[in-house]
Image (tube, rainbow, N blue to C red):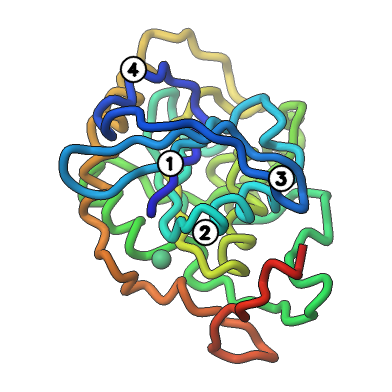
């Protein structure tokens, strides 16, 4: 099963390419209710759940998002994020492929391992190689970037934007961290594609001229192919925990007790 996390608002009819709408449901988790998530079924290929992820209560606790995905039987998660372009080479409407991240969130500790104490999951590769490869293939213009995971509800200051760039971050967003490492804890594949929708606070404003809409159309046109290209059985290794104390194992059957 696949899940699209939709942090860039697009009208539901724009998602017809992922299949016909089948049902909508909310998922209760120990960390709050997630949804509604909508199920779409293509004429060929596998079903895709779609979770809107902007501005709403879905942001309350990212653990709820990952927990809900696991409960729905999802293995592959693709997040479509809207990001701030920090790197001066990036402009509005550029499509980016996050290849690594810096965690600049404050809601620590956020982990499923508070009770079982496994922890210390390897973060290399930071994002699922299978999904990232499919994104590269179908959106060849997507630029590999280092992603700074921040928190809302505010934009960065100009001083922060300059600091993030010194660290090597090229874009800043609010929707991939801690989701990326929570996915690893639950042995789920997680990767993302982003669209630059605004420029960093230390950069000159640019007038919208439809570049973001054009980027959205490119991604909408590629989503179904990205999902259908993924191998049925993950070849990426994301479905095995890569934790220190537990070494390379699998999630215990009683994972639900971690909540
Ligand atoms: Zn994977």
Badge 2 or badge 3: first in the primary sequence = 2
Front tag of 3 and 4: 4
- Residue 232 visible in the shown view: yes
Task: Say which residue label 2 marks.
Answer: 100
Label 4, residues with CA under 10 Å away: few <14, some 14-19, many ≥20: few
Q: Is residue 9 left or right of residue 180?
A: left
User: Which residue does the numbered mark 3 point to in the structure image?
Assistant: 163
Mark 3 vs 4, N-terminal side:
4
Distance CA(mark 3)–CA(mark 1): 37 Å
The answer to whether any part of residue 81 appears in the image is no
Q: At x 46% / y 73%, what residue is drawn?
A: 239
Which circle, 3 or 1, is nearer the viewer?
1
Label 1 environment density (alpha carbons within 10 Å; few <14, some 14–19, many ≥20): many
- Please tell me which of labels 1 and 4 falls first in the chain: 4
Spatial CA distance of label 4 from label 2 is 32 Å
User: How far separated are the C-alphas under marks 3 and 4?
Assistant: 40 Å
> Helix, strand, or loop for circle 1?
strand
Contact, mark 3 vs mark 4 (Cβ under 8 Å): no
**Quarter of the figure that contains the C terminus:** bottom right
- Please name the residue shown 55% across and 87% down the image: 249
Q: Residues within 10 Å of mark 3 (few under 14, many from 20)?
A: few
Q: Earlier in the sequence, mark 4 or mark 2?
A: 4
Residue for badge 4: 13
**Residue named by callout 1:** 49
**Closer to the observer: label 4 or label 2?**
4
- On screen, residue 46 above or below 201: below
Secondary structure of the residue carrying tag 2 is strand
Q: Quadrant of residue 252?
A: bottom right
Mark 3 and mark 1 lie on one chain; the one further toward the N terminus is: 1
């Amino acid at each position: 099963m696949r899940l699209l996390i939709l942090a860039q608002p697009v009208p539901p009819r724009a998602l017809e390419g992922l299949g016909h709408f089948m049902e909508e449901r909310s998922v209760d988790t120990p960390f709050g209710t997630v949804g509604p998530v909508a199920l779409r079924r293509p004429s060929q290929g596998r079903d895709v759940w779609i979770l809107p992820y902007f501005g709403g209560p879905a942001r309350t606790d990212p653990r709820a998002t990952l927990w809900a995905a696991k409960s729905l039987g999802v293995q592959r998660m693709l997040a479509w994020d809207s990001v701030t372009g920090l790197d001066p080479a990036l402009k509005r409407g550029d499509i980016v492929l996050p290849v690594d991240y810096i965690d600049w969130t404050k809601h620590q500790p956020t982990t499923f391992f508070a009770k079982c104490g496994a922890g210390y999951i390897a973060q290399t590769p930071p994002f699922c190689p299978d999904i990232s490869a499919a994104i590269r293939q179908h959106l060849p213009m997507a630029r590999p970037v280092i992603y700074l995971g921040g928190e809302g509800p505010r934009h960065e200051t100009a001083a922060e934007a300059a600091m993030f760039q010194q660290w090597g971050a090229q874009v800043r967003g609010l929707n991939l961290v801690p989701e990326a490492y929570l996915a690893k804890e639950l042995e789920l594949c997680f990767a993302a594609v982003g669209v630059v929708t605004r420029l960093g606070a230390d950069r000159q404003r640019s007038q919208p001229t439809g570049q973001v809409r054009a980027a959205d159309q490119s991604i909408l046109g590629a989503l179904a192919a990205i999902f259908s290209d993924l191998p049925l059985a993950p070849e990426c290794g994301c479905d095995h925990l890569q934790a220190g104390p537990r070494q390379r194992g699998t999630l215990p059957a009683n994972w639900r007790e971690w909540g």
